[in-house]
Image (spheres, rainbow, N blue to C red):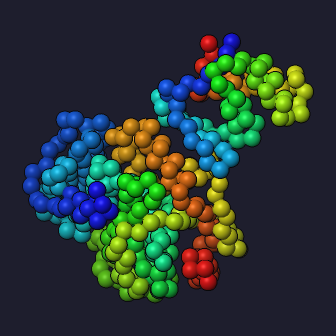
Amino acid sequence: MTFAQSMALLADESMMREGETPETLPNALNETPNYAIARDAFLLKLPSGLHFYYRQGKGVTVSYPDDVSHLEVSLFLNGSVYGAIAWINGLVPLHASGVAHRGQVHAFTGHSGAGKSTLAAALGKRDLPLLADDVMVLDLSDPDVVMCLPGHKQLKLWRDALEMTGYEAAGQVREDMDKYYIAPDSGFNAEPTPLSHLYFLEDGAKENIAFSPVTGAQRFNFVRTSFYRSQFCAAIADSRDMFATVARIAQQVTITRFDRPRRKEVFDQGVNAMAARITGG
Amino acid sequence: MTLRKATSRLAETEIDDEIVLMNIDTGHFHALRNTGLAIWKLIDGTRDINALCDALRQSYAVDPDVCAIEVDRFINLMVEAGFVERR
């Protein structure tokens, strides 16, 4: 399958229609109160009554009560459901945001709230187009390339991140969240593009911004922790295959720790340092 | 008693100068570096603890008794983690 076909597959499999959703998956390999996953299907049941049912080759069916908004539906479709679809179809979703420069992707990962989207948005004001926000899907079908498939064309920012980056909100993510969609100023990289660098965002630095290379077994650990919804993969993938996937990414991608103070007054310094790192400036 | 890697239930990969091991049954990971890595590379299914020590002492200037204690400790750890079998 070509990378373009993988993109088309991901888009087709994410097509959603309203309809009935089951209570359980009969062939589930892992089942919790909120989700069930099988090798060819995924069921997500949220406390709000919003349910998604994905079947490989048949797309997504959704059902929800009247008081669930379309915003909430989109949020989960583009998050957990999208991640499950990627895993089920042999792709590898990372919990990362990334920008493209000269045919290479520089991706940022870290815990929720580490500033992945904020950094990608800020770099969008420095001529670095967005590749994906929050969920970055990798296609490893070519053994020599860790290929990123373009993701959603909008970023999600909390209000304080909007203010720090100077963006105008294009819409609220959900009525009860102070989080907003934005369109990055440098636009969107719409072509599959190789992942060259993965940066781990940390905020332990008191004063100085620091880049430090990650080596050895820690590369493996960092890649493993960057997987999006890794519990889905653990449920359906052979553990040797999963190990080999982590090892391959760890060996083929440059991994760097990016530590910076999380203070608004030094935010721009961190962004400038990252932009210089990416562009070689 | 010779020592061998439990290859049927482990996965390993070398990254830079370290090795990552995963126990397939438990999902537990272990990283090896320095002397642990050196001992691991010497486990070939034919050597026992003494032979491992002899081979190590060709590369490392270490007292034989200390070497035996350290190798024994490492092997016990590896056996407990399911990465090495005694036979």
Q: Residue at x 57, y 42 (%)?
A: B13
Q: Residue at x 54, y 65 (%)?
A: A197
Q: Is residue A5 above or below residue B63?
A: below
Image quadrant in which the C terminus of chain B is located? top right
Q: x%, y% of residue A170? A: 31, 83
Q: Quadrant of residue B73?
A: top right
Q: Quadrant of residue A76?
A: bottom left
Is A263 left, or right, of A14 in this rendering?
right
User: In the current view of this chain or complex, which residue is farthest to the left?
Assistant: A19
Q: x%, y% of residue B39? A: 72, 31
Q: Is residue A149 visible?
A: yes
Residue closest to the eye, A268 or A147: A147
Image quadrant in which the N terminus of chain B is located? top right
Q: x%, y% of residue A74? A: 24, 66
Is A37 left, or right, of A277 in this rendering?
left
Q: Residue at x 50, y 27 (%)?
A: B9
Residue closest to the eye, A174 or B62: B62
Residue closest to the eye, A28 or B62: B62
Q: Residue at x 49, y 26 (%)?
A: B8
Is A185 left, or right, of B30 in this rendering?
left
Q: x%, y% of residue A61? A: 15, 55
